[in-house]
Image (tube, grey):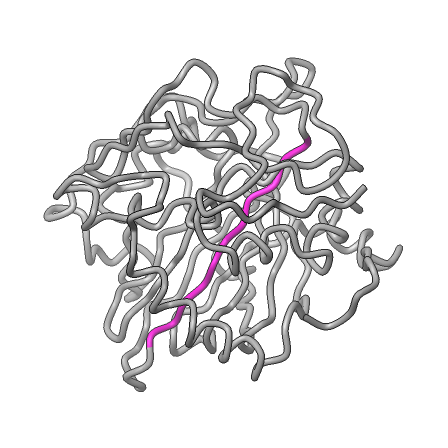
Amino acid sequence: MITSTIPALSAEQLAFFKENGYIAPIKVYEPEEMEARWKVERLKLMDRSNAVYQLDSHSGNTNIANYDRHLDSEMLAQHVCSPEIVGRVRSVLGPDLLCWRSEFFPKYPGDEGTDWHQADTFANASGTPQILWPQNREFGGTITVWTAFTEATIDMGCLQFIPRTQNQMFYDETKGMKYKPQEINSVAKDGDVKRGFFGYDYRELQIDPDWTPDVDRAVSIELRPGEAVMFWSTLMHASHPHAGNTKKMRLGFAARYVPTSVQVYPGSDAIEEYGGRIKLDRYGAVVVAGDNHNETNRIASATTRGFAFPSLP
């Protein structure tokens, strides 16, 4: 990693983040270090014997298979707890933080783009809230830190954002969406750009059926290996298709953070989405900074292999 000190957003960076909903690039690793770490770790992750989610035949072929590998991988555990990341998130969310989820986002040559979307309670696929902020908040969302484990260029499918959209929800997550991967994939939704949402049509959640995202204001975030972008999940975001001009995969790893007062998976003992189902009996959120202020949350103090999660005081 870059430094042993605890970084934070500068006043200028914090002002930019509050206005636009994102900040990039954040350097978490040097490119050579990232490539070396991932070369070793990708082989280890093939072993799911200690993963908290044991997948059925359907779940293993969907995005749900990529959830929360920081709960069994020491390298990913160190990553989600990294001061390079947590220190900056703390600048926005305050001293007491949970990492409640992590996800891999691979994009292979020829893959379509990801459709424009926002996430507040993450009920978008199932209609069941996965995080709930205290009741005095109109909506909350999460801060996502999306780290490029490989090169992420426009041609390879890097992320896109529409700045200053984080404070208004254009979608109603309580509607839920129908999982129809064979019908929805590869639909041209943005001019000639083919976008999908892992087997869902995100337009089913639109509050105004006739509304369309203002794609003319979109910005593309290209990242080197080891660089990250930090953004509100309520910010309108998408990704480019992988044009296939290289045989290399684009891989991002997203860690999601909320204050410890936020309730995680309220009343749920399983997640059902993307055509799969995972039980939460071995799940735990990770306190990455400060103290836990919600005793109803499941908390994990160590990975399933016994590595204790480091936490900022």
Q: Position of residue 174 (x, y in %)?
A: 39, 21
**Residue 241, horizontal then vertical, whole percent:** 33, 68
Return the residue nearer the eye: 66 or 49.
Answer: 49
Judge from the rendering whether residue 142 lies leftward or rightward of residue 205; answer left or right. right
Q: For this view, does 118 lie left or right of residue 48?
A: right
Is 202 drawn above or below residue 26 in the view shown? above
Say which of 305 and 91 sits in front.
305
176 relative to 265 in the view: left or right? left
Q: Residue at x 71, y 44 (%)?
A: 311
- Where residue 129 sits, quadrant-wise, is top left
Q: How many marks?
A: 0
Residue at screen point 51% across, 45% down: 306
The quarter of the rendered structure image containing the C terminus is top right
Work out which quarter of the rendered image holds the N terminus and state it.
bottom right
The reply, left or right, for residue 276 in relation to residue 42 is: left
Q: Main secondary structure of the magenta part?
A: strand
Residue occupying the far front of the picture: 306
Task: Give the residue drawn at x 41%, y 39%.
Answer: 211
Residue 256 painted magenta: yes
Would residue 298 be counted in the magenta stretch?
A: no
Displayed quadrant of residue 292: top right
Asked if 282 appears above or below 213 in the picture, the reply is above
Give the extent of the magenta segment: 249-259
Residue 193 position (above or below residue 203): below
Measuring 61% from the left and 30% from the top, which residue is drawn there?
140
Q: Nearer the viewer, residue 115 or 215?
A: 115
Rendering coords of residue 214 (x, y %): 50, 52
Q: Is residue 129 above or below residue 112?
A: above
